[in-house]
Amino acid sequence: MLSILIPCYNYDCRKLVSSLQKQGESLKTDYEIIVGDDASDNAEIVSLNEEINALPHCIYSVCEKNLGRAENRNRMAEMSQGDWLLFIDCDAQVCSDKFLQSYMEAAGRARVICGGLCHPPVNPCPDATLRYKYEHKADARRSAAERSKNPYMQLSAFNLMMRRDVFMSIKFDKDCREYGYEDALMGVELHKRNIEILHIDNPIVHIGLESNAIFLKKSETALHTLYGLKGKMGNHSHVENMATKLKIYHLDKIYTWFYSIFRKNMRKNLLGKNPSLFIFSLYKLGFFLNIKG
């Protein structure tokens, strides 16, 4: 049985669930779709999503309190009945009529299968230039062939299927309450346990591109998450690795001085119409070095 698990928060999931449900009906295996709402506070969206319960094999379940990104996914896994768990983020769009079928055909080849993601060829939101530039550059490295070169570092919970027994033995780290790093930590754990990841070209489209201001705030939140993990990522975080190198060579204070002088100008660029990804990298490193425990 296949369990499709979709975490959401203040997001209308009806179109995504409907497209997946139609594909599920053509599968040769049983399936279920569980949407786990992490205590959304938008009553209108909750009301719309409740329509999901009327679809065959579909459940819309609202948490009584906000659990956080990792625990919400873990809760859905515990609710599910399938021996395969497929995690899909709510701001996704299915772009292939054989999306679920492709996963089922790959199921005999590995216990963890990552399908990948992509983005629209043209930026759909003029205020989302930073996120679009960042993701568009990353898309060039998101083919299955490219991801397979470093399989554990390229794990994404945006579109990920794994055996139930594998997931339940690891689960998403509960310390990842807010944005960032729950899937990266899963990759670290799979690597430690020598569990193979199969990367395939079975992407879904990420359509939930945020404005520059929201994406910058989410990136800052992710860096706070990384700091709070206190080394759990090992050497798998570029920002953390760079910060460590600066401290080893006693250059961290010089960099934080540089960051304090140029922070406002960097933010102005990143929030503008033509943000620089190089400046974004400099900003993230400076922000991380300035986080206090």
Image (cartoon, rainbow, N blue to C red):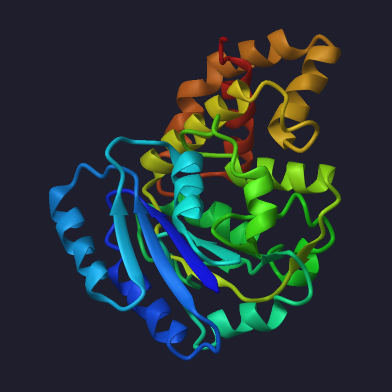
Report the number of numbered marks. 0
Q: Position of residue 25 (x, y in %)?
A: 43, 87
Q: Position of residue 290 (x, y in %)?
A: 58, 14
Q: Nearer the viewer, residue 114 or 62?
A: 62
Residue at 23 percent across and 62 percent down: it is 49
Q: Is 159 positioned to the left or the right of 209 in the image?
A: right
Residue at 32 percent across and 48 percent down: it is 9
Quick check: can you spot residue 51? yes
Tell me the quarter of the image containing the N terminus: bottom right
Quarter where residue 123 is shown: bottom left
Residue at 18 percent across and 47 percent down: it is 42
Quarter where residue 225 is shown: top right
Quick check: can you spot residue 270? no
Q: Position of residue 154 (x, y in %)?
A: 71, 54
Check the image and report above or below for 258 versus 19.
above
Q: Nearer the viewer, residue 135 or 170?
A: 170
Tell me the quarter of the image containing the C terminus: top right
Q: Nearer the viewer, residue 36 or 177?
A: 36
Residue at 45 percent across and 82 percent down: it is 24
Check the image and report above or below for 121 versus 252.
below
Q: Position of residue 103 (x, y in %)?
A: 63, 77
Check the image and report above or below for 171 versus 249.
below
